[in-house]
Amino acid sequence: GDRCVVWLDRPLDIIVAAAGLTAIGAVPILVSPALGIDMLTQVMSPVPPVARVVTTALRAPSCSALEVRSRVDDWASLAEEARALEPRRASVRLPATAPYVVTHTSGTTGVNKLVEYSRGGADHNSLTQEVPALVQRLRGYAAINFSPVHFRFVVGLLAALRRRVPAIVLADDDPGSVGPVLERWRPSY
């Protein structure tokens, strides 16, 4: 139930951190890497102090403006420490009403706002993501580009995992990385 800010640059790092946090029953607050510390401080002001902030070494010093109960962790250090840990066999099972993930709005009013989703809400939304694929009996591959800090990504990934859809997750969006993957797999959608 501890809320932990995830403020990282690389999409794959955000995905891995969020998956790890939800597996242990923590609630990740997924923050866009484009959000500056001033906006992040404003967005976090109504939120009780978070347990942790997972970020980069470059951003860690600016996190002193946030109320953090435990500590600010450097993602690279955490990833290095994790190499020595035994794999976890089972995730924490939360009730449907329990907080699951927090994302923020795009800030169309000038200020981003946080939105908390329950585990049941995420499950329901991911099930509705599956319906079009089931009804249309889609065949072939789909290329999808979502920001990993957006709730639509969270539910899309849950839907893919539930359906056991093979996925290729790219570590970056550089055309030199994306191009060869698209050429090889030739998505239909």
Image (spheres, rainbow, N blue to C red):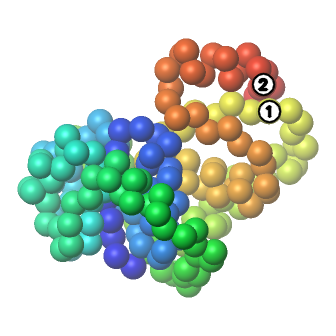
Query: Which residue is found at the position 14% from the left and 66% from the top?
Result: 67
Residue in the foreground of this view, choosing between 163 and 133: 163
Q: Residues within 10 Å of mark 1 (few under 14, many from 20)?
A: some
Q: Which mark is residue 185?
A: 2
Residue in the foreground of this view, choosing between 125 and 186: 186
- Label 1 sits on residue: 141
Please name the amino acid that badge 1 sits on: Tyr
134 relative to 25 in the view: left or right? right
Q: Position of residue 160 (x, y in %)?
A: 71, 52
Query: Which residue is found at the position 57% from the left and 21% from the top?
Result: 177
**Observer able to see residue 150:** no
Which of pointers 2 and 1 indicates the residue nearer the eye? 2
CB under 8 Å between discs 2 and 1 = yes
Quadrant for the C terminus, please.
top right
* 3D distance between C-alphas at marks 2 and 1: 7 Å
163 relative to 136 in the view: left or right? left
Residue in the foreground of this view, choosing between 19 and 142: 19
**Observer able to see residue 41:** yes
Extreme-front residue of the structure: 84
Q: Residues within 10 Å of mark 2 (few under 14, many from 20)?
A: few
